[in-house]
Amino acid sequence: MTKLLVLSDSHGGRAAIERVLLKENANIDALVFLGDGLRDLEQALTPYPRLRAYSVAGNCDYGALEPMDGLAAFDQTIVFYTHGHMYGVKYDLDTLTDAAAARGAELALFGHTHVPHAFLAMDRALRARSSR
């Protein structure tokens, strides 16, 4: 089973990412960063050149070349990942859920809200999770 480390919204807190990576790097297979701190991530990943990292730009990642969302497969599960600001995740998860389902995703990851959240849409078999 693939172990993912999901991070988001560091907003200049590179040291926090470094602490988490130092503690968890031996226990994870990949990292998914959900935006708002891409420079923090880039600098924190320097000691881990072999770590698979997936990232998207957030609304505070000015001038970033990373996409706003991504799609990846882990252990036969298709994962849609995004910062969330383009999908209105602070208000509801309907647009995010629809976007993920339209891409064939079974799991959606998002940040932006700064609030941990777990949601299971039984009718669409889609799980959405946010990270801090």
Image (tube, rainbow, N blue to C red):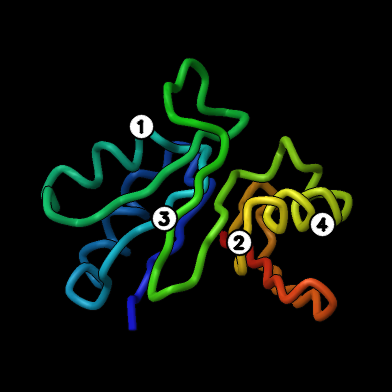
Q: Amino acid at mark 1?
A: Arg
Label 4, label 2: how far apart the Cα atoms are: 15 Å
Considering the numbered disc 2 on the image, is that residue within a helix, a strand or a loop? loop
Residue 93 — which label?
Answer: 4
- Secondary structure at numbered mark 1: helix
Left or right, 130 with respect to 2, comes to right
Upstream in sequence: badge 2 or badge 1: 1
CA gap between label 1 and label 4 equals 27 Å
Q: Position of residue 95 (x, y in %)?
A: 82, 48
Label 4 vs 2, first from the N-terminus? 4
The x and y percentages for residue 59 are 62, 30
The quadrant the C terminus occupies is bottom right
Q: Answer with mark 3 or mark 1, whichever residue precedes in sequence.
A: 3
Q: Which residue is mark 2?
A: 105
x then y, percent, for residue 44: 25, 45
In the depicted structure, whether residue 44 falls above or below residue 21: above
Residue at numbered disc 1: 39
Amino acid marked by disc 3: Val
User: Residue shown at 37%/48% (left/top)?
Assistant: 54
Within 10 Å of disc 2 (Cα), the crowding (few <14, some 14-19, many 20+) is many
* Earlier residue among tags 3 and 2: 3
Q: Quadrant of residue 27?
A: bottom left
Q: Are marks 3 and 2 in contact (CB under 8 Å)?
A: no
The residue nearer to you, when weighing 25 against 1, is 1
Inter-mark Cα distance, 3 to 4: 20 Å
Identified by mark 2, the residue type is Ala
Q: Quadrant of residue 37?
A: top left
Query: Residue 122: horizontal and vertical position, in percent?
Result: 81, 80
Q: CA distance from mark 2 to mark 1?
A: 28 Å
